[in-house]
Image: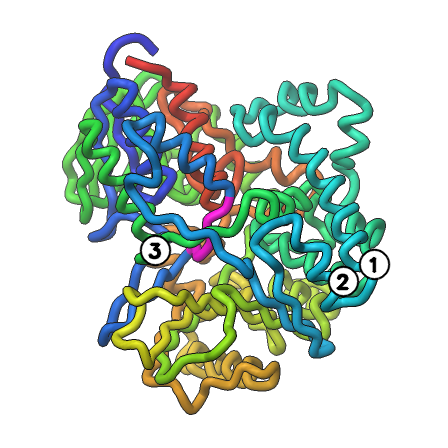
Amino acid sequence: MGGVARVVVVGAGLGGLAAAARLSALGHRVTVLEQSDAVGGKLGWYTRDGHAFDTGPSLVTLPQVHRDLFDATGGPLEDAVDLERLDPAVGYRFGDGTRLAVPGHLDAVPAALDAALGEGAGAQWRALLDRAEAMWAITEQPFLRSPLRGAATLARLARDPVDVGTVAPWQTLRGLGARYLRDPRLRVLLDRYATYSGSDPRRAPAVLATVPYVEQAFGSWYVRGGLHRLAEAVAERARERGAEIRTGTPVRRVLRDGGRVSAVELADGGEMTADVVVSGADATALYAGLLPPSRRTRAVRRGLTRATPSLSGFVLLLALRGRTPGLAHHTVLFPEDYDAEFDAVFGTGRHRGVPRPVPDPTVYVSAPDDAVTRPDDDSESWFVLVNAPRQDPDGGVDWDTPGLADRYATRVLEVMAERGLDVRDRVRWCVTRTPADLARETGSVGGSIYGTSSNGARAAFLRPGNAAPVRGLYLVGGSSHPGGGLPLVVLSAEIVAGLVGPA
């Protein structure tokens, strides 16, 4: 667009902050409006009695995406945050008791798999990742780094029949695993990556195999001091480029005039004029509440209705006495029956239509060895996450039911003990965070972490595009194209900056 635009960014999550930094660097006048008292959105931070926790994402992948953001807005990423490559990247404990430490460098992974799972496991995984690497080469630019343009995007991806065969849009992630992985533990390992987009591996597309490829090829990283520092660094970069960030300022509505955005209405009744509005709010919340319904937005609203909402998460913040020798930064404890977990979360299988808390869940533990997170060297602060159905009092689970959160926290600690990680006698205190809490704190509908899931071959194309049907309105964040997870959220801001263009 020509000239300097008055840009209002709704929400100071990472997507909104990255858009603010890029658009400010392009010469626009940018104001960010955030309903809470702190920036970061799901990149939250909780402190108490010297214990501190990241309360959202706990892993940085595709660091080059973040480097691109900082290079485009004034200086290197490494000048702003201290990135640490993790090795091992993650420790796994399978339902049969097998333990696996996945190295932090791709060339070391096959040998580690052979040593833990038996000869041939490494070759099976390597063959899968070779396929995933080819998928990545085909989809990265036309899909992840470009605006979603419906049939045009499909046509671009479908130009070469060989490429279509490689991506195999008709195949599920589970189906791809069955083709390449004979060891059932490797198939469980692959299935887990569907949850990175809040999805069910039995319905999610095979192209999600690019997620473990990216994680292992480009590394798993931690930000010293906590991942929330990444959001703070992007906010500081936006301010340096001239953006104004206002916290404690909820937005009530996006206003239009003559088919394009004209202003935002604040919760206190005031208005702020805008040529461009960038919404970092949950897409369902935007189209159902912030944006009055119209003929222009009907198709998007219909697509959101057809898509399956992503799963949510149930979190324990554990303040622990003592240290745990040999524990990886990230640890995953698998159940014996992984399918039962997805049936419970999505209300499928014998629980069709009735989601419920998972009785025997996969447990993810993030235990950073970082002095900032603990009061002394004889303490630990663990972030514990299990997959959970979203908040849905009418048709699913009401996480605000009195006593439910405490009972389920006790169950999660029992499961950890059953799988060899018993910390019950070391707990100083425990804070629970349910899907209902996530919904209240971040505005994500039902606490769905990624907006809509990737369940179904067409799911990626049901996700709202970055350019809304209302002129001057753009979407960033995990509930819009290209999807959830830190690198994709940052890419959404890059796409939007390209659509708006320089002043």
Where on the picture, by quarter, is residue 332?
bottom right
Tell me if residue 177 can be seen.
yes
- Residues under numbered marks 2 and 3 in contact, where contact means CB atoms less than 8 Å apart: no
Mark 2 packing: few (<14 Cα in 10 Å), some, or many (20+)? some
Is the magenta region chiefly helix, strand or loop? loop
Q: Position of residue 109 (x, y in %)?
A: 67, 55
Viewer-proximal residue, 444 or 255? Answer: 444
Q: Is residue 79 left or right of residue 42?
A: left
Question: How far apart in space, not on screen, are marks 1 and 2 (Cα)?
Answer: 6 Å
Image height of 247 relative to 337, above or below: above
Residue topped by disc 2: 114
Please state which amino acid type lies under the numbered disc 2.
Asp
- Viewer-nearest of labels 2 and 3? 2
Residue topped by disc 3: 224
Q: Earlier in the sequence, mark 2 or mark 3?
A: 2
- Residues under numbered marks 1 and 2 in contact, where contact means CB atoms less than 8 Å apart: yes
Residue 120 badge: 1
Q: Position of residue 356 (x, y in %)?
A: 58, 70
Which secondary structure lies at badge 1? loop
Q: Which residues are magenta?
A: 57-61
Please state which amino acid type lies under the numbered disc 1.
Gly
Where on the picture, by quarter, is residue 341?
bottom right
Q: Position of residue 414 (x, y in %)?
A: 54, 85
Residue 219 badge: none
